[in-house]
Amino acid sequence: MENTAVLTCLQQNYFCFSGHSSSLPSRSFSNTTLSQPFSLKLQKQPALVSHYVLRAASPARGYATLSDTYSGTSELADIEWDNLGFGFLSTDYMYVMKCPQGGKFSNGELQCFGNIELSPSAGVLNYGQGLFEGLKAYRKEDGNILLFRPEENAMRMRMANRRWVPPTGKGSLYIRPLLMGSGAVLGLAPAPEYTFLIYVSPVGNYFKEGVAPINLIVEHELHRATPGGTGGVKTIGNYAANYSADACSEGTIGLLRPKAILTVLYLDCIHKRYLEEVSSCNIFVVKDKMIATPAIKGTILPGITRKSIIDVAQSQGFQVEERQVLVDELLDADEVFCTGTAVVVSPVGSVTYLGKRVSYGDGIGVVSQQLYSVLTKLQMGLIEDKMEWTVELR
């Protein structure tokens, strides 16, 4: 199951919105039922060019086709875009393909979004055999859609869920690729079958408050990863440990103002002195014109937003160091911020370590604001992409 096999299948099986074919072959959606007639209300958005218009099929047929009629409008799902939060919202389709152990991925298919069937003995349920990714799509002012650095997620794809990409400035379409051991296995062994699946959901800001400072609790007893483990891989089991640490940190919430956004920052498990990462984000420490972030050495996830921020910061004249960062540096910093696909850039308002709280202010810092502004404008196509990171879907 090499990445090349995944990429090949994806390249052969996407819905192409810029092609010249007048129609796509109809697909049957096995083991999939529609819970309601496939007839959601659509909003017309003028002046957006689209080569194809999604045409819903009848519930009896259970599939959708793309009409060959050129349209000068693009259709949007009828939801309250202005009130879009960061939560799951089911869309129209998901992409699925399978691979037997030691074999090759089959030609995938685009299925109506719905539940999937798994054996109780599936490898993903019993032994955590699963990986996942996360990336975003943004709508440009001209109506075209941008994927941000999809090659970094080992993906090159185009989406049939186009109408779920939020209007410009209203949010983004979160894309979740998932690889899991779906075959039944009782003993501790690789699953006999694997399923690759992609689903999407329109999302707003990760935090309801928007770009608001978060408050970190430094966890010095519990650890999310160990050397030689899977901390540097986006496996499904890596995030379960956060729940225990989050529960322990609730006792500290009294030190903070009401409704404070609280999350955990982990230290290395050997010396318990060096920063690793936040529950679901990478961390950066700013001192003067120097920006430091923990080096990737197997226990820290190599975030794509982290990588992007490093490049953006260097292009803006900042010096960036990837190295071991002492917790004492965190307490003496001018500014601290976190990065991730979901949050993009999130300023840190305070850090609490061994009962001592250090505050960095109530708003977003100057450096955080500068980097956030450049990266989000690039993601949304508002400035020239000199990095060649975005892939435009027409």
Image (cartoon, rainbow, N blue to C red):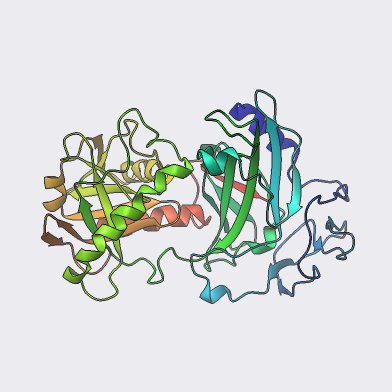
Q: Is residue 382 left or right of residue 196?
A: left
Where, quadrant-wise, is the N terminus in this rendering? Answer: top right
Where's residue 269, x and y in %? 23, 37
What residue is shown at x 60% (from left), y 26% (from top)?
Answer: 2
Where's residue 293, x and y in %? 26, 42
* Residue 223 sits above or below residue 342 on the image: above
Where's residue 143, x and y in %? 65, 61
* Residue 50 sits above or below residue 122 on the image: below
Q: Is residue 190 visible?
A: yes
Quadrant in which residue 228 is drawn:
top left
What residue is shown at x 23% (from left), y 54% (from top)?
Answer: 336
Quadrant in which residue 144 is drawn:
bottom right
Quadrant in which residue 67 is drawn:
bottom right
- Looking at the image, the residue that sits furthest to the front is 186
233 or 333, which lies in front? 233
- Looking at the image, the residue that sits furthest to the top is 102
What residue is shown at x 61% (from left), y 34% (from top)?
Answer: 185
Q: Is residue 281 left or right of residue 98?
A: left
Q: Is residue 32 left or right of residue 366?
A: right
234 or 359, which lies in front? 234
Where's residue 239, x and y in %? 40, 48
Q: Is residue 365 visible?
A: no
